[in-house]
Image (cartoon, rainbow, N blue to C red):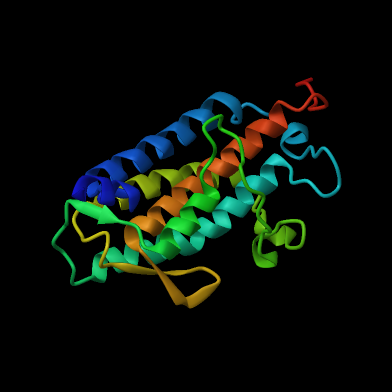
């Protein structure tokens, strides 16, 4: 009875959660190396239509989120008084909703379309691009792996992370990490879909 209840509440052990997001983050790094680092500028800036993001814009979008979440999470981990890790982690209803909205389906497909906040949309804010968006993302994923490692030393449930669009709303650290990593995975898949589009330009 207790086991079933905990299962239904999306309970993970803290180590399971951190292992999962570490695996996804390392997979993202491998996908970048395998699929994107050799692309030309023309390929990186190609878009299928005027309303779609190109590859540079996809990673610029992720980098802007990372700029907020990596710094905020690292500071919260460093300064928290909740330094006793707990083995079990249970998502809050809000946290579960947040990361489930980002998580890919079993077929690595985007299950739910989301409207991007304007401040994080490179079509409205081209200044989000820095000309080295892939490298910035790669560097950010390496930093994220270090943050995940440091998170193993604190209580993933008691440390709270304010979300990027409202400092009043806070997620449990475990939920925030799941949100960030699933969001990264979602958009790396989006970038792969660009490469696999039938009109994607060949390397000349």
State whether residue 99 appears in this view: yes
Instruction: Give the percent coordinates (x, y) of residue 63.
Output: 55, 53
Q: Residue furthest left?
A: 84
Which residue shows up at 39% across the image and 49% down it?
144
Which residue shows up at 71% across the image and 33% down it?
194
Left or right of residue 5: residue 181:
right
Q: Nearer the viewer, residue 87 or 141?
A: 87
Which residue shows up at 80% across the image and 24% down it?
198
Circle count = 0
Instruction: Give the percent coordinates (x, y) of residue 17.
Output: 31, 45
State whether residue 40 appears in this view: no
Vertical side of 63 occupied by 40: above or below? above
Q: Nearer the viewer, residue 97 or 82?
A: 97
Instruction: Give the percent coordinates (x, y) of residue 168.
Output: 46, 79
Q: Residue furthest bottom?
A: 168
Q: Nearer the viewer, residue 38 or 122?
A: 122
Left or right of residue 56: residue 188:
left
Q: Quadrant of residue 155?
A: bottom left
Q: Residue furthest front?
A: 1
Instruction: Give the percent coordinates (x, y) of residue 131.
Output: 66, 48
- Tell me the quadrant of the picture where the C terminus can be found: top right
Q: Quadrant of residue 54?
A: top right
């Amino acid at each position: 009875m207790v086991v079933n209840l905990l299962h239904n509440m999306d309970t993970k052990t803290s180590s399971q959660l951190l292992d999962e997001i570490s695996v996804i983050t390392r997979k993202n790094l491998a996908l970048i190396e395998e699929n994107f680092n050799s692309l030309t500028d023309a390929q990186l800036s190609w878009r299928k239509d005027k309303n779609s993001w190109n590859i540079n814009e996809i990673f610029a979008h992720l980098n802007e989120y990372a700029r907020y979440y990596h710094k905020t999470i690292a500071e919260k981990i460093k300064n928290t008084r909740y330094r006793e890790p707990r083995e079990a982690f249970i998502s809050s209803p809000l946290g579960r909703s947040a990361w489930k909205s980002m998580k890919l389906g079993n077929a690595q497909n985007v299950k739910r379309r989301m409207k991007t906040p304007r401040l994080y949309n490179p079509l409205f804010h081209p200044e989000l691009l820095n000309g080295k968006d892939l490298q910035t993302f790669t560097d950010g994923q390496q930093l994220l792996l270090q943050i995940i490692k440091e998170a193993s030393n604190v209580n993933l449930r008691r440390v709270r992370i304010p979300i990027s669009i409202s400092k009043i709303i806070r997620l449990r650290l475990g939920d925030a990490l799941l949100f960030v990593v699933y969001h990264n995975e979602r958009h790396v898949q989006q970038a792969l879909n660009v490469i696999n589009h039938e009109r994607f330009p060949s390397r000349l």
